[in-house]
Amino acid sequence: MLPQSVFVLLLTSVLSTSDVSEVKNGSLPSENGLPKTSKENCSYRKVLEYLNLTKDNNLYIMSRPVKHHRTATLVYLDMVIYAILDVREVEQTFVSYVWIFTTWMNDYTQWDPTEFCGITSIAIPNEALWKPDLTIEEMTEKDKAPPSPLLKMYSDGAVFYKNDQVIISTCQLHVYKFPFDTQSCNITFKSILHSDEEMTLTGSENNTEITMWSREVMRMQYEWVFINMSVHKKHDDKMGYNQTSVIYTITMSRQSVLYCANFLVPILFLMILDMASFLIPVTGGEKLSFKVTVLLAVTVMQLILNEILPSSTDRIPLVVLFCVGIFGLMLLSVLETIVIMYLLEKDSESLDSEGDPALNAETKDKKTKVNCKNSLTVLKKCCWPDAIQDHETDQNTPSPQKDSSSQRLDIPLALDLFSQELDEVKKTVSLLSGRRETTGYWTKLSKKINNIFFAFYVGGAVVFLTTIFTLWIMADEK
């Protein structure tokens, strides 16, 4: 009986020792004979202890996580635009809110999920592991929002990091077709220090997929309409080694309805008002003051436009040509009004210097009548009464021949006097008619100038507006 009892004790001790070792290894015997995981190894802490990933262990953040220095770290990058916050034309900047997804491999953060209750991933603070030194070339201001506090590592060594970021980046805006313009802004990711031999940067090349993804998550577009987003790679050799950059291009078009309603249409209305001012009489000063007021209103619109558009553009925007052209037509209209008023004033001055032409003509007619009457009287006294007296004298009593011959000698003198008076009448009539024609000459000329200029104004405005709107539709943005 003693040897059997000793054998039983030894067998029990062996079984208990194997159970303890299995517990220490993280597994217990199950009913079907397969190892069973211990509940003590089902926490994230056990995984971190297994990896020796503690706060004081700086080996995980000091260098690239590769077991051989010639092994390049593959970094996979994706970006989705969440909102278009602002596009500043004067500063040439593009403000966007984006989601950046980064994935890379870490050779020192691998474990067997079966040893830790099937744990395949764990979230840890982002300061605990090495991260790629990615930067955005176009960024002009550092993001003031705090970065995402956590990253996730997987059992196969993959590390995933998502960061939401407000990016203020430079963007070369082409405002030639403003406000019907389409802009394309780039966001370029690259490594600050690592070359392609050390770190390989890549991203999704399916432009349709990232465009649809951005449209699904887009929450705000400011005054723009998101069109698409494309991605391509660029290889540079500026620092003596090759570097790969991943460039995301965001294409968007401006919503021009408000600009048309608040800017373009009012300027067209001002030009129509200026055309309607041709119906105002020029004799008063209201026409000139009205035209100057309309011209000042266009100047105010140009000042507002100057605050919107950048001063560093290489081509004059069409909207500037639009405003300058209308301003020029209105300026010519003001100058034409000034010329017309000058001509009418010149005509009125001639009238004032000569007095009332009707009264002058009446006075001249009276004088002419008096002169003619006097001439006829003299003629009657000199010629006709003598002839009558001669006839009567022949019938009754004869008169001396000397008196009749002296009276007959005065007939040529009377005729000469009468002809002189007639010449003076002709001169007076011709002078009055010439003065009347001279008095109405400037008025007629001003009317002709006004009609010709109005036709030129309307025709020039139609041709100009047709050309500008055709360029807005057909011209190339760049």
Image (cartoon, rainbow, N blue to C red):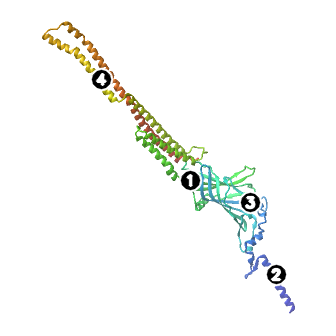
Residue closest to the far left: 396
Helix, strand or loop for disc 1: strand
Mark 3, Cα crowd under 10 Å, few <14 / some 14-19 / many 20+, is many
Check disc 1 and give the amino acid type. Ser
Q: Is residue 267 visible?
A: yes
Among the two numbered marks 1 and 4 on one chain, the one whose residue lies closer to the N terminus: 1
Check disc 2 and give the amino acid type. Thr
Q: Which residue is the site of mark 3?
A: 73
Which quadrant of the structure image shows residue 167?
bottom right
Q: CA distance from mark 1 to mark 4?
A: 85 Å
Q: Which residue is the site of mark 1?
A: 253
Q: Which residue is the site of mark 2?
A: 17
Q: Position of residue 394 (x, y in %)?
A: 14, 10
Q: CA distance from mark 3 to mark 4?
A: 120 Å
Q: Position of residue 432 (x, y in %)?
A: 34, 26
Q: Which residue is the site of mark 4?
A: 367
Q: Is residue 439 above or below residue 187?
A: above
Q: Nearer the viewer, mark 4 or mark 2?
A: 4
Mark 1, Cα crowd under 10 Å, few <14 / some 14-19 / many 20+, is some
Among the two numbered marks 2 and 3 on one chain, the one whose residue lies closer to the N terminus: 2
Residue closest to the far bottom: 1
